[in-house]
Amino acid sequence: MDELEASLPGERLRRALERAFERWASPGVRHFAHASSSARAALADAIDRASAADTFARAQEWLGAVAGGLALLGLLALGTGCGVDANPDKGANRVFANLRGTGTEPAPAAREPVDASTWEWPPGPHPHATLAVAGRGEIEIELFPELAPKTVANFLALAGRGFYDGVAFHRVIAGFMVQTGDPNTRDDLPDDDGMGGPGYTIEDEFGDAPHVRGVVSMANTGRPDSGGSQFFIVQRDRQALDGKYAVFGRVVRGMDVVDAIAEAPTDLHGRWGPRDRPLEAIRIAGVHVATPTAGTHAAAAPAH
């Protein structure tokens, strides 16, 4: 059996391939949304064939076909949407080399993650925002102005004017995160989902807070200071994201709701709009903000 398949067989290999193209297929890069349905289907089929290949060379050949198809469509340029990269590696050869651990390029210096087990969240009182998710329940988020003051102020201002009312979770990846905050998702037209915002961007406030289960962080396009209104909730620890996204809160109640959203059936290949978009819209009905008075309580315990 091929070394690659031994370590990443079947569906695990498929997901690894899809993660490798996250930068192209995320809401930050709109190739699947703007390509014709036949082109999207052809590219999805190439990914299917790569994951089912019986040899490493054959899988590499099909992955190269995917990259070539995207290039021919002229769809490799970054768009204006916000996304979260699960794997920022680029190029078919480098992707497979990295998966096999035989890359010829030296790995970039990794940011040293903080020890999540000893990380201490700032003590309260803090403002809390409760997302009412239609037909699902509530997600209560403790906000941390100490970690990201401008990000928290922006979120509270948007929530206060009803900006998030009716907005859908447009990107859902089980075992990773759920993403929302795009006003373009209020309608039933999926092609521009993931590309919207409030009409302005805010300053990055990257810090040391770890991206562990329940953390709420701002999405961005990968460019400096490109966040606006989109945010994501981490479903499973992903400290590779540390220092790349602005952590501004954590879920203290309702992680069961987050888990249910994460397990919703999605359009994995973007045949009907953005990739990883729930097939049935999951919307925020409203956001209620409460500001505890000083001395009422310390930081709430995170939801599990």
Image (cartoon, rainbow, N blue to C red):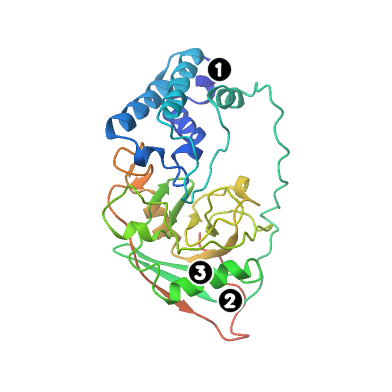
Q: Are marks 2 and 1 in contact (CB under 8 Å)?
A: no
The kind of residue on which mark 2 rests is His
Residue wearing tag 1: 3
User: Cα distance, mark 3 to mark 1?
Assistant: 46 Å
> On the picture, is 272 further left or further right than 60?
left
Q: Residue at x 36, y 50 (%)?
A: 192
In the image, is residue 282 above or below residue 172? below
Q: Residue at x 46, y 18 (%)?
A: 59
Name the secondary structure under disc 3.
helix
Name the secondary structure under disc 1.
helix
Name the secondary structure under disc 2.
loop
Mark 3 or 1: in front is: 3
Q: Position of residue 3 (x, y in %)?
A: 55, 17
The kind of residue on which mark 1 rests is Glu
N-term-proximal mark, 3 vs 2? 2
Q: Are marks 3 and 2 in contact (CB under 8 Å)?
A: no
Quarter-wise, where is residue 152 in the image?
A: bottom right
> On the picture, is 144 further left or further right than 27?
right
Q: Position of residue 227 (x, y in %)?
A: 54, 58
N-term-proximal mark, 3 vs 1? 1
User: 10 Å neighbourhood of mark 3: few (<14), some, or many (≥20)?
Assistant: many
The kind of residue on which mark 3 rests is Phe
Residue 155, numbered circle: 3
Q: Position of residue 85 (x, y in %)?
A: 53, 43
Residue wearing tag 2: 126
Mark 2 or 1: in front is: 2
User: 10 Å neighbourhood of mark 2: few (<14), some, or many (≥20)?
Assistant: many
User: Cα distance, mark 2 to mark 1?
Assistant: 50 Å
Q: Residue at x 59, y 25 (%)?
A: 94
N-term-proximal mark, 2 vs 1? 1
User: Cα distance, mark 3 to mark 2?
Assistant: 14 Å
